Image: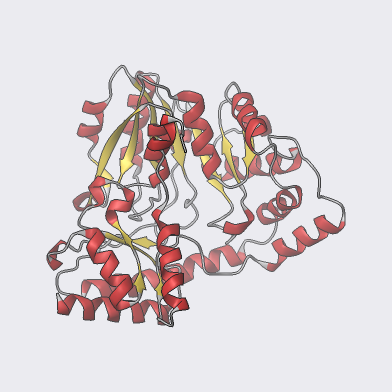
């Protein structure tokens, strides 16, 4: 089969590949603790399910506007205005089937051959994949454990050039759980404004934060007109399978992102959008409880990993991942993750699944029960002793 050259530049998301391998082992009778996939293990709150059921019964089974129902876009605009402290109009909102299409559409719309796109590394693999796909040049910003997995601001400034078209930020961060501080965002905002650079701010984990208040670069001077804010319902409301996300962007960009939506998925599912309205406007108790449970699990897994000789684990400030340093084991990331799955029955991801600067680390999702987390830590400790 002859494919276009672009397809050779398109990457993947390793979590789903590891999940398939783990399921195959389970089919053979092996017990596996799943710490590979980044999704809450909680059920979607019942009031959201009820809203979807009611919408189905009321006939919300047809096409919708490509940018989303006006009522949902208005609810999102109000929520973002409240949570980020910025003025947002519903016309700035584009609703998509999951948050990932916003990454896809924004990079397609803004970057091309000859442009440079800066992105965190290690980072969500779709950033680099899409930069390569459109033919732009990926410029990685190495995240450093010693600074809480933030990139070096002096290095960042040195890498900015007259070719820099877009900067991608992710805070709280996947895979490290790191968080950009206000002082970091101030520098990035100033550099972006001075050099007329767009910013894609991936904030899907903004409500899974264990200390402080979420800060969005969109709220900084000069940034409202050059920031695309990406968020969704998957993580906050345990709605990964519902596929509901959105982007908030300058008015002049929204029609172009909407056109990409029209040309690809047409629209986001009608009854899912009705459920999204209820998610934002209904009681938030279960979302808050989920974060508190994640906090408990984080404390268990961090303490457990730090008790293993040869393993060092930074305490994440947000999201539901740990990114332990395994260099002390003497093994590289991919072989270590493979042995964890095949020999110890723990499904984890190699740090290199998130980019070259992830070497020496693995990612574990603690979106699992405390009992399973303790079982996984015990299995990791036993494997390390055998090395």
The number of discs equals 0
Q: Nearer the viewer, residue 382 or 47?
A: 382
Q: Quadrant of residue 120?
A: top left
Color encoding of the figure: secondary structure
The residue shown at (22%, 49%) is 147
Left or right of 52? Residue 305 is left
Q: Of residues 162 and 185, which is closer to you in this image?
A: 162
Q: Residue at x 44, y 36 (%)?
A: 7
Residue 39 in view of the camera? yes
The quarter of the image holding the C terminus is: bottom left
The percent coordinates of residue 141 (x first, y second) are 27, 38
Residue 190's spot in the image, x, y percent? 34, 26
Q: Quadrant of residue 185?
A: top left
Residue 381 lies, with reference to residue 211, above or below; the image says below
The residue lying toward the viewer, choosing from 19 and 51, is 19
Where's residue 26, x and y in %? 44, 77
Residue 224 visible to the viewer:
no
Position of 344 relative to 353 (above/below):
below
Going by the picture, which residue comes out furthest to the front? 1
Q: Residue furthest top?
A: 162
In-image side of 178 versus 42 (left or right):
left
Give the residue at x 39% y 58%.
211
Q: Is residue 341 left or right of residue 21?
A: left
- Report x, y in % for residue 249: 56, 30
Q: Is residue 204 above or below residue 253?
A: below
**Which residue is found at the position 22% from the left and 77% from the top?**
383
């Amino acid at each position: 089969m002859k494919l276009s050259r672009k397809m050779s530049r398109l990457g993947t998301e390793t979590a789903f590949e590891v999940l398939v391998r783990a399921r195959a082992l389970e089919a053979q009778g092996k017990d596996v603790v799943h710490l590979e996939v980044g999704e809450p293990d909680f059920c979607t709150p019942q009031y959201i399910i009820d809203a979807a059921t009611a919408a189905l019964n009321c006939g919300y089974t047809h096409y919708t506007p490509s940018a989303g129902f006006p009522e949902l876009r208005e609810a999102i605009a109000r929520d973002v205005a409240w949570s980020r402290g910025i003025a947002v109009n519903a016309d700035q909102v584009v609703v998509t089937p999951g948050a990932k299409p916003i990454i896809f559409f924004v990079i397609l719309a803004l970057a091309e051959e000859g442009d440079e796109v800066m992105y965190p590394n290690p980072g969500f693999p779709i950033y680099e994949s899409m930069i390569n796909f459109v033919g732009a040049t990926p410029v990685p910003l190495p995240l450093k454990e010693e600074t809480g997995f933030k990139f070096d601001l002096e290095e960042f400034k040195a890498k900015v050039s007259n070719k820099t078209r877009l900067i991608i930020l992710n805070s709280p961060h996947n895979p490290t759980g790191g968080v950009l501080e206000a002082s970091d965002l101030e520098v990035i905002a100033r550099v972006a404004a001075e050099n007329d650079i767009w910013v894609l701010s991936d904030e899907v984990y903004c409500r899974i934060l264990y200390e402080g208040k979420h800060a969005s670069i969109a709220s900084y001077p000069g940034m409202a007109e050059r920031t695309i804010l990406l968020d969704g319902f998957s993580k906050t409301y345990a709605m990964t399978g519902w596929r509901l996300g959105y982007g908030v962007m300058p008015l002049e960009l929204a029609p172009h992102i909407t056109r990409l939506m029209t040309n690809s998925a047409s629209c986001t599912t009608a009854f899912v959008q009705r459920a999204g309205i209820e998610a934002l406007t209904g009681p938030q108790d279960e979302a808050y409880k989920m974060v508190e449970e994640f906090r408990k699990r984080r404390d268990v897994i961090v303490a457990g990993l730090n008790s293993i000789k040869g393993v060092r684990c930074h305490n994440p400030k947000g999201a539901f991942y740990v990114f332990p340093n395994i260099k002390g084991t003497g093994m590289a990331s991919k072989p270590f993750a493979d042995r964890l799955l095949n020999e110890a029955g723990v499904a984890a991801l190699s740090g290199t699944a998130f980019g070259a600067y992830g070497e020496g680390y693995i990612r574990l999702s603690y979106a699992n029960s405390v009992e399973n987390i303790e079982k996984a830590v015990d299995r990791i400790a036993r494997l390390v002793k055998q090395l």
